[in-house]
Amino acid sequence: MIELKKILLRHILVTIAVAISGLSFGQSNTSDIVSPASPVMVSNVGYRLLIDSKKGGIVSLRSTFGSERNLLVPNHIDLPLFKLELMDDHSKFRPISSSQAKKITIQKTGDEKAQTVTIEFKSLDNMPIDARVTIRCPANESLTYWSIELANDTTLWIANLQFPLVEVPFDNPADGGHNKILWSFGDGVLTGPIEPSMNLGGWSGTIHDKPEIWRYSNYPGQWTTTQLMAYYNDVGGLYMSCDDATGLPKMINPLMENDGVTLGLGHFPGTRGPGKSKLPYNVVIGTFQGDWHDAAEIYRNWAEKQPFCAEKLAKRKDCPKWISDSVVGIAFPMRGQADFDPPATANPEYSPATNALPFLDKLAKKLDCSLMPIVFNWEHGGPWVQPDAFPPMGGEASMQEFMAKAKEKGWHPYIYGDGLSWVTFQTNTNYDGMPYFQSHKGQAAVAYKWDGTFLEDIWTWRKNYVACVGTEQGRGMIVGMTKKMSEFGPDVIQQFDEGAGPRACYASDHGHPPVPGPWMAEAFKKLLNSVAAAARSKDSMVAMAVEGAPPECYLQQFQTWDARVGTCPLYSFLYHEYANGHEGFYMNRVSDEALRLSIGRAIVTGYMVNLTLREQGLINYDWDQLWTRAIPDQNGAIDWTKRCTHFRADIARDYLIFGRMLRPWRVSNITEHDLGWGKEPLVQSATWLAPDGRIGIVMANCSDLGESPRVELEGSGTKEIVLHLDGKMIKQSTQLPSVLDINMPPRSLCLIEVK
Ligand SMILES: [Zn+2]
């Protein structure tokens, strides 16, 4: 929450009852209510919100910090305030919206501390369905809190609910004010300018608004990690989130429209009529000034008070000590080059896995640190084939021997499962899993779409059904897979590929409601507990990992993760002090410079480094780069990884392992290159707060040339500044604020501590 220090309420705070009768919720309304022509307005120093009195929709939301700007599309009033889909017992959907209410009344009440706008919608689409939307507007915050209650006197299910509809415009090239949108796919995506050709997707490109999108949740799971979205430019920004700490399923994603971008927020009450349902959390909408860090600070202020932030890494007893000692992850494919490339023939260097040990030994010596060997493409039937995965490539005994020997060397072997997937085809190996699926009664484990077919992921190289976490059989398949992996004896089990979270199921005979809903969160928690117990059946300190950062609601359930990063470290900013992951794969490592840059980015944003091997124990650019590419400069990659990892584990430890990321102090005068992810500074940097209050600016010059970054030290008074530059240390007293120009040699690391 933002405290507004100078509250200049532009509106006199008197209770205004625009409509004062007929507001008893859930009853038929026969009283005569006169809707005023003028919109209802709530405003304070940070925003001005207009709600249309006739339609009950949002007319406009203006950011009013200093200079004003309208944040929404000009014709926003044409959008309903909410939409929902009802579903009958034959899985037929019926869309309705707030615009179809027979009667709409609105009132504003409150005092100098807070105002509340209540909007009643009666008889939606001529059905006995009413809705009440409440918008609580504390006077001293730039945030407003939106809730909705539905009184559904039909016998239909509420399949999904879009609330509230908020659409931001495309940028106007004439006014030059480029905007950005932030959301939480993977570690966070920051994208802009806002235009029809922009990418608003996850892996598969821009997502357009269509009914099917709203029928599936993507949070938690599906790589969506937090409930924050933001839209902003230099003049002002729009903040949007939910304040749910319990991981109820939602659809949270920006969606492309014809005239702008909807900041999509979908909810799944999972109820049928007759009865009432109320969202058990608020949608939080407000304004802010600044950039994504400011939006993230608002969100962090809420998040750090939630149970999922109960323990910081330093205090977590479930996190093995080795994770906070920093290791280097080394992934090696037992067959194939990546996981998508046919034919997936065995690699004799890594199959059986014990064959990888000499290569790993050599690397561990050169890197002078402990390794986290990541075994992939190990499954019997082909990469990611689950649950028909056993025996592993090379046999059970050699896999156990590999794990045991790796641990004897002080390493921490890591193995992947395949999340909720029941794999039925793997074209790389010509695996046909249908006989196994049928003979193991897979039908009883799988989620259904509304049309009565199995929920299925179809890739060019693999097909899988998706387990319903609401079924004993679905959970059993995943737990069984985990238990068998645990018998190999790894230190890390990453069962949750494709993120940790449930997926929707519309089956009517699974014992759960036939629509997505809170049952998914309960069932997934049950699954998570069972998977953790199975993973730790032999060793109580096995770490649970996940693909992509853990969704915040499961932050205390995962000890590490295989991150999916971009260039916006939102997740590190929000949650780094609670747990540590490794930077993961798919990092645009297309050349030696891009490889070094990704390692520098990992280190400054608090991640452990990971590398992938190609033939003969050679470092590959990345998991997703085939071996037809040139072989990277081995000595260069090893030397940079070694120095970055030592830096992380040693002098920068209190910042990069246990610290909290701060809004960055300005670092300028740096060369930028576009290596495929847009222009990126070759000196990667971040500002951190150590648990004891010291501030550290970390910088990694990933370039082949010297760089002279200029660092603006913030604060006031005389402070001791300690500069660590590639093993050299300089101490000096400095009057803050101050500016430092640092001469960084090529491929060098620097920490500036302010004590
Ligand atoms: Zn189901």
Image (cartoon, helix red, strand yellow):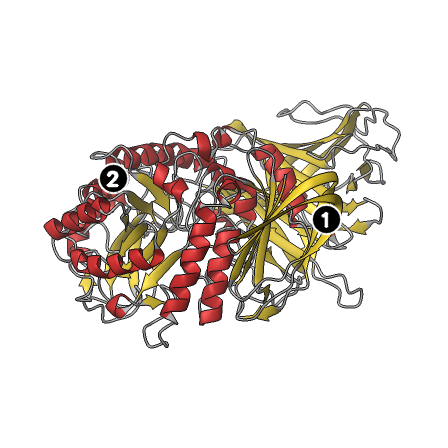
Q: Amino acid at mark 1?
A: Gly
Q: Is residue 587 above or below residue 137?
A: below
Residue 90 visible here: no
In the rendered view of the protein, which quadrant contains the C terminus?
top right
Which residue matches tag 1?
A: 290
Q: Secondary structure at mark 2?
A: helix
Q: How many marks?
A: 2
x, y percent for residue 133: 66, 33
User: As rendered, which of 33 and 149 lies closer to the eye?
Assistant: 149
The residue at 76%/49% (across/down) is 236
x, y percent for residue 386: 24, 51
In the rendered view of the protein, which quadrant contains the N terminus?
top right
User: As rendered, which of 659 and 55 lies closer to the eye?
Assistant: 659
The residue at 18%/48% (across/down) is 405
Q: Amino acid at mark 2?
A: Val
Depth check, mark 1 against mark 2: the one in front is 1
**Location of residue 492 by image quarter:** top left
Callouts 1 and 2 close, C-beta under 8 Å:
no
The residue at 30%/55% (across/down) is 364
N-term-proximal mark, 1 vs 2: 1
x, y percent for residue 190: 60, 56
- The CA distance from mark 1 to mark 2 is 45 Å
x, y percent for residue 608: 42, 50
Q: Is mark 2 within 8 Å of ligand 1?
A: no
Neighbour tally class for label 2: few under 14, some 14-19, many 20 plus, Cα within 10 Å:
many
Residue 695 falls left or right of residue 633? right
Q: Is mark 1 within 8 Å of ligand 1?
A: no
Which residue matches tag 2?
A: 479
Q: Secondary structure at mark 1?
A: loop
User: As rendered, which of 592 and 210 lies closer to the eye?
Assistant: 592
